[in-house]
Amino acid sequence: MKTSFLPLIVTLGFSGSVLADGKELVDPPVFASSNKVLDLLMIAKPVTVGTLPGVITGWAYEICKRQYANKDGVSCQTSKTNTNPYGGVRLQLNAGDTLKVHLVNKLPQIPESKHKDDPTEGFLSQNPTNIHTHGMLVSPRYPSSKNPTYGDNVFVLTFNSNNGMPEMSSTAHSHGDMKMDAIDYQITLPRHHPSGLYWFHPHAHGISLNQLSAGLSGIITVGKVTDYVPTLPSNVNERYLILKDGQVNADGSLHDQEDPDFCDDLTPSVTTGACNHVSGGKWYFTINGQLNPTINVKSSGGELWRITNASGSVTYDLQLNKKTNGNATNMMMQLVSVDGVSATPTLGISQSNLNQIGGTKFESIECPSVKSNDAQAICVNKLRMMPGTRAEVWVVNRDVNGKIISGNGDQATFQTAGYSTGESGDTWPAVDLAQVTFLNTKKGKNPPVLNVDDRKHDTTGLNFNAIAQDLAVENAAVSPDSSCKPLPNGWKRRIFFGIPTNADFGLGFELVDEKGQPVVGSFQDVAAFPDAKKSICLPLSIGNTPINEHWELINLATEDHNFHIHQTKFRVLSTSELQGNPSVSGILQDSVPLPTGDNGCDGSVNAWRKNVCKTSPVDVEIPFAIAGDFVYHCHILEHEDGGMMATIHIAGSSKSVAFTPKN
């Protein structure tokens, strides 16, 4: 939503040698688990160096393995830490591993933030922080007498004591625990956790946008690509692309409270790496912290690009634009994975159903030399990536028909075409992100598409029963709650994304019975950070086995939203399936775009009830297999920080049946 802009003055920072425009793209540094454990010291702090032009400072994670911490325990040995904190790092884990993090808060106070003046939110100026492992199927557990660490729990904040002692209301953005200076996390991955691409970032409600825009994020990979592309040719290289952006004033200060209109005077309409503010500032769009790098595709089999949108609010409309004989075309790419899970739709699915269950994140096109009923291949020439989305695509030199061609020196531009999120939403600029050169492509040496065959993931989704068994101890620690009731057969939850009367963003709820009628007494109008006690509570099934729910997501505003839920995945239901036809499942996600409503939408449920507001609901089926407290929200962080977030409590089942662990 377009709002008045409040600048937050910090500076965007980098560490290590300067990476000038046009240099070869460098993969983020890797910290890998050993003997089933990755034990890290992670310091959130200001860092000052200059990957971007000028000397500017920001917030980023200094990271090293715990064994390489200095004697003070809150800093890393220089030779053992990451050398480009703003660009981000990659944590390499495997199913069954344990991630341990000692998080230290050395962040400065925030001199200005949009929400610090909201009721009960003054503590936000002290810049508390935490971490969330986005998209991962792990427990959000609280500490216990036997284990004082936290799981993937966003209801805890760590403050820097140098910024003063916090005074935080019990109602402040539903936060619970407070820690001073440092906190310990211990996050165990289920043995049946899917292999794929995930990421980590702070989830301090009210200043998530500020902290993410300043550089606090990195990526996580679980397992190997060959876990879901078992016949991946040895000549296909893997490459990691972390998309980050930062707005810098002419004096070198950074706009953390990201302004979509920062470059409203765009000349030309597509810029390279950055666009200009009328005052002389710059809006930089980087990959791995590098500005307009070169990507040399040297492998004869092309590359598998593993892409993360780590922006706080920007939507990227990604394409690979190639000029042939003076004509520009969008190159075909094969989509291999979405949001950390391989994309394997049902055999014989139509293009329209495929695009719908993909959540409008892509528009599929016919793959070359592949029959239309081949379930293992999705080809695209555009990716719509809202904040938090991940996608993996196979990029190889192709002609306008998608056929792989030989050549040495063919060039393309990796770019975002620009995107508008609606009449009352934001317009994100068109930017050239990298220059791509294809080298050594050999005709006849590559299959037309890669064979996606995930042994942990079939057409009905992940094995959530196995994941629940893997987390049996964590689930058993969450007590039954007689007030948490499963939905009767045929019922669904309806979630409204709208505009409350006293805030910019909010959520509302109601239950809908098997006849499609709202359940009397279940309605809660749209509100910012709605009361957790009136939000969503349900138990796991008997024996703490998974329970499935149907949610209908309704956007009441004239701007896009981006539904995201923690601790699980979901699948989008097609119109065909909603009409009673067989399932066309197979693409699991943790976020989905909610398209804008028409001009009759004013953000209220009342306009929708009167049929004045016409919008397109998105129906999802969500399996819940992990007990505890977590959240769902819009992953446009301006919207999340402004109130479009609510809690969910998954209680233990009321009847207990012992599990027999399975491999």
Image: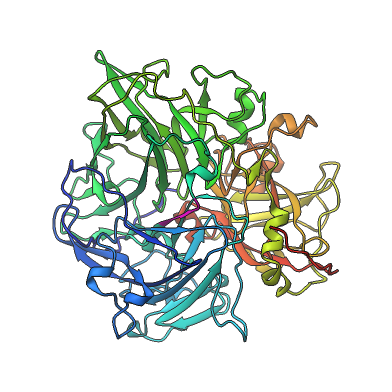
Observer able to see residue 572: yes
In this picture, is 525 found above or below 186?
above
Estimate the x, y position of residue 14 in percent, counting from the top left.
Answer: 23, 60
Name which quarter of the figure residue 437 lies in: top left
Picture residue at 67% right of the left edge, 65% below the top: 471
Estimate the x, y position of residue 80 in percent, counting from the top left.
Answer: 27, 69
Q: How is the image coloured?
A: rainbow
The C terminus - image quarter: bottom right
Picture residue at 63% right of the left edge, 21% below the top: 373
* Foreground pick, 508 / 38: 38
Estimate the x, y position of residue 464 in percent, counting from the top left.
Answer: 69, 53
Magenta span of residues: 219-223
Is residue 116 on the magenta stretch?
no
Picture residue at 42% right of the left edge, 19% below the top: 402
Observer able to see residue 126: no
- In the picture as drawn, the residue positioned furthest to the left comes out as 54
Name which quarter of the figure residue 572 lies in: top right
Name which quarter of the figure residue 193 lies in: bottom right
Picture residue at 17% right of the left edge, 49% below the top: 279
Estimate the x, y position of residue 300 in percent, counting from the top left.
Answer: 33, 29
* Foreground pick, 545 / 273: 545
Q: Looking at the magenta stretch, what is its main secondary structure?
A: strand
In this picture, is 390 found above or below 660?
above
Q: Is residue 452 left or right of residue 430?
A: right
In this picture, is 131 found above or below 553?
below
